[in-house]
Structures are given as structure tokens and as C-alpha cells.
């Protein structure tokens, strides 16, 4: 699959790159994508929810009424879950939502996500660029040149580029990651995927293992 290379002004450089069919043109495995996205979202959960149970509620342990002769059910404590202010039955406890997935499945999920974006023609290949200093206005100009200023976009860098990252940090619709930080969720969550030339070799090398 051939894709033309643009510069950061949105103009055609006259060059084309060949995207690997084994990464960008496979038959997407929807279940692998589902599991990888599910794991990503599960890992974002803190799991710090907690409700007080019967033994943890503050209050007297005195038996509140005699056992028999009241005409109502027996009750041994005001902390019983059936009374207002009592403990919670089967309430949430702190827990981890994370779970493990095989590396091969995660690679398949990322390749599937790339293939989905390629099939939808939502991949842009951009020649490497840098800013002398972090400047959000310069990054917005790049988005305008690529006609992405009103769309959710993901820029994938070959290596960590501090100035480009800091220039995009204030923009909610744009995200900048290095190729080693890329996730299936990030790929699918963006309307357009902008791959810098230096990232292609890293991506294809990591996913062809």
C-alpha cells in the first residue's frame, strides 16, 4: 500500500512510502480489538471505591429490643443493613480491574486497528518536523495545513520529541505519542492518524515480531 508523504505545510513532497501489508492491510480481528481496548480502559480505573459494611459502621452494638414478644422480626444491632444508617450489603470494595493479555493478541489488535484506519483512508504520512521551542500556535498551523483543526487526531512520533509534544498538550482534540507508547485505543479513538516517517519503521518492526 503506497501513501504519499506530506510536509508540515500540508504539501506533497513528491515522495511515497510503502506501508507493510502485514501491518496495514490485514483482515481486522474485532474480538482482539475489543479485548485490547477493554484492557486499556480497565487499567485506567483506580478501583478505590469503598462502602462501609456492618462491621465498619460507627454505632452501638447493644441489642435494640428484646428477642420475642414485639410482633416484629428479631434484631440484634442498629448497624444491621436493614436499618437506616446501617452497613451496606455486598458494597464495593477496593480492587484492581486489570487483567492480562498475550503479547501476540495485543499485536494483532494494533495491526487490526491500523488496518481499519488504512481501509478508511484516515492515515496521513508526514515528514519529520520539529519546533525550535514549544509553541501551540505552530502546532495549530500544522493542523490547519492538514485540515485537522476540527477533528480528533493522533500524531505518532518515531522518537520522543519534547517540543512537539508540549506544543500540542493544550489541545483537547489532538494527541501526540511516540511509537513505543501507541495503543489500540489511541488509534481507534482518533478520526485521523498522522504518522511521521521515522515512526513507520519502528511500528512495522514492533508489530512484525
Image (spheres, grey):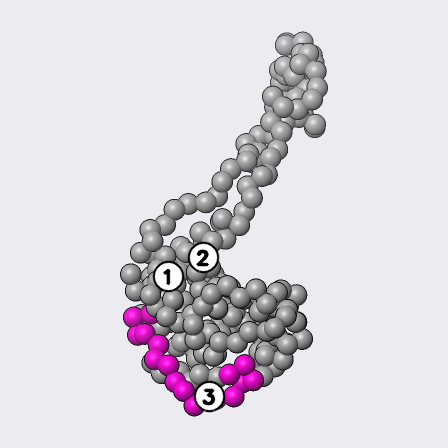
Q: Position of residue 189 (x, y in %)?
A: 51, 65
- The answer to whether 156 is drawn above or below residue 5 in the figure is above
Sequence order check, earlier mark of 2 and 1: 2
Residue at (46% x, 73% y) in the render: 195
The crowd level at tag 2 (other Cα within 10 Å; few <14, some 14-19, many 20+) is many
* 2 or 3: tag closer to the N-terminus: 3
Label 3 Cα neighbours within 10 Å, binned few <14 / some 14-19 / many ≥20: few
Q: Which residue is mark 3?
A: 13
Question: Answer yes or no: do the residues labelled 2 and 1 have beta carbons within 8 Å?
Answer: yes
Residue at label 2? 37
Q: How far separated are the C-alphas under marks 2 and 3? A: 35 Å
Distance CA(mark 3)–CA(mark 1): 32 Å
**Which quadrant holds the C terminus?**
bottom left
Q: How many marks?
A: 3
Q: Nearer the viewer, mark 3 or mark 1?
A: 3
Q: Is residue 66 above or below residue 127?
A: above
The residue singled out by tag 1 in the image is 109
Q: Residue at x 59, y 78 (%)?
A: 143
User: Which comes before the other along the chain, label 3 or label 1?
Assistant: 3
Q: Residue furthest front?
A: 132
Specify start and end residues of the magenta stretch as a single range.
Answer: 7-23
Q: Quadrant of residue 5?
A: bottom left
Q: Label 3's element?
A: strand
Q: Nearer the viewer, mark 2 or mark 3?
A: 3
Instruction: Give the residue at x 56% y 44%.
Output: 46
Vertical side of 156 occupied by 121: above or below: below
In the rendered image, the vertical position of residue 199 relative to residue 143, given as above or below? above
Amino acid at each position: 500500500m503506497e501513501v504519499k508523504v506530506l510536509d508540515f505545510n500540508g504539501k506533497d513532497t513528491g515522495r511515497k512510502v510503502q506501508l507493510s501489508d502485514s501491518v496495514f492491510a490485514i483482515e481486522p480481528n474485532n474480538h482482539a480489538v475489543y479485548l485490547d481496548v477493554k484492557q486499556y480502559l480497565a487499567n485506567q480505573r483506580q478501583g478505590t471505591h469503598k462502602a462501609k459494611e456492618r462491621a465498619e459502621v460507627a454505632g452501638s452494638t447493644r441489642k435494640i429490643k428484646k428477642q420475642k414478644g414485639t410482633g416484629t422480626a428479631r434484631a440484634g444491632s442498629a448497624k444491621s443493613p436493614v436499618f437506616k444508617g446501617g452497613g451496606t450489603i455486598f458494597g464495593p470494595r477496593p480492587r484492581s480491574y486489570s487483567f492480562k493479555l498475550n503479547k501476540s493478541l495485543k499485536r494483532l489488535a494494533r495491526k487490526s486497528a491500523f488496518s481499519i484506519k488504512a481501509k478508511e483512508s484516515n492515515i496521513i504520512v508526514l515528514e519529520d518536523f520539529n519546533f525550535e521551542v514549544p509553541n501551540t500556535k505552530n502546532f495549530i498551523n500544522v493542523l490547519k495545513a492538514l485540515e485537522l483543526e476540527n477533528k480528533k487526531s493522533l500524531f505518532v512520533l518515531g522518537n520522543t520529541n519534547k517540543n512537539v509534544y508540549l506544543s500540542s498538550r493544550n489541545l483537547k482534540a489532538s494527541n501526540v505519542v511516540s511509537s513505543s507508547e501507541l495503543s489500540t485505543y489511541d488509534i481507534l479513538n482518533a478520526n485521523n492518524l498522522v504518522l511521521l516517517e521515522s515512526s513507520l519503521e519502528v511500528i512495522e518492526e514492533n508489530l512484525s515480531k
